[in-house]
Amino acid sequence: MHQRGKEPRPTGFLTAPGMTGLVFPRLFRTKPGAWLVSLLLLPGVWAAELPPDAAVDRGVPTMTLTPQVVVHSGRLEWEPFSRDLSAWPTLSHADRRSTEKPRRVSLTGPLEGDATRGRELAMRRDKGFCMLCHQLPGEQWSGNFGISLLGYRLNHHADADLYQQVFDPRVNNPHTAMPPYGTNRILSDQEIRDIVAYLQSLE
Ligand code: HEC
């Protein structure tokens, strides 16, 4: 398990005896210079901490790698995977970006969502992909990690509550595994309205 508390502090690293004076004599004595040097060295500090089998490209922590079996060798080779994940925070060891805080939102105006479009968005792998965790009608291979959404309309939830749940479920449960679709800009305002209309149509 990676322990955040034990990371080498960049300042401590840079002020190691003799080190800065030797390598960056002039630059380091100015404040902006010190920052610049820290920035240049940080990737090196990060890379050094990664476990040897981490599936990330050390140069570009937000690019994933895919394992390829090297035939008859008992080895795997890691090939760069074409998808750039820099737009999203990931669970990678090397990803030190902070996650956006849970956002409380209020639905403005009437819902004006389209349930048919909502169903499509719920099914799309690059959008809702809700059936990864929830049972939905017509889906043979849905997950059971979240509650079944069959007949969900019968719960008579307010549109605004469902909008909040899809926009950022962390407001209702800080430890939820359900993605914050609105805060992380996976779904737009209209797309969330469509999905809420779809949820409200489930008999
Ligand atoms: C990674 C798994 C996952 C995905 C993907 C996911 N959910 Fe959830 N969802 C959950 C879990 C787990 C809960 C249970 C409550 C919690 O953990 O906050 C939940 C709760 C809910 C609830 C509240 C249920 C209640 O108690 O009334 C709704 C509504 C919901 N999800 C809709 C969706 C929709 C719509 C999508 C797709 C846009 C979606 N979920 C995608 C895991 C997921």
Image (cartoon, rainbow, N blue to C red):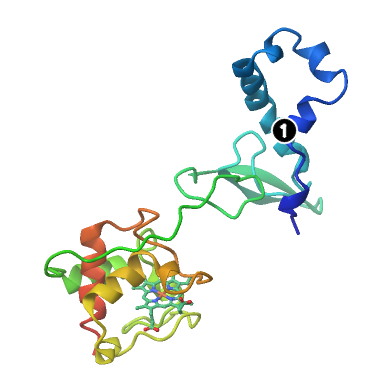
Q: Residues within 10 Å of mark 1 (few under 14, many from 20)?
A: some
Q: Is residue 190 left or right of residue 63?
A: left
Element at label 1 = helix
In-front residue for pair 181/98: 98
In-front residue for pair 142/154: 154
Query: What residue lies at 24% left-to-right and 62% top-to-bottom?
Result: 191
In-front residue for pair 89/69: 89
Query: What residue lies at 51% left-to-right and 50% top-to-bottom?
Result: 89
In-front residue for pair 190/202: 190
Whole-percent x, y for residue 27 in the image: 68, 10
Relative to 117, say whether 186 is above or below.
Answer: above
- Kindly indicate the quadrant of the structure image that contains residue 199: bottom left
Residue designated by label 1: 10
Query: What residue lies at 76% left-to-right and 43% top-to-bottom?
Result: 49
Relative to 51, say whether 157 is above or below.
Answer: below
Whole-percent x, y for residue 109 in the image: 12, 66
Relative to 6, say whether 201 is above or below.
Answer: below
Q: Quadrant of ligand 1?
A: bottom left
Q: Is residue 131 left or right of residue 194?
A: right
Whole-percent x, y for residue 174 in the image: 50, 69
Q: Amino acid at mark 1?
A: Pro
Outermost residue to the right: 17
Q: Is residue 123 visible?
A: no
Q: Is residue 170 left or right of residue 137?
A: right
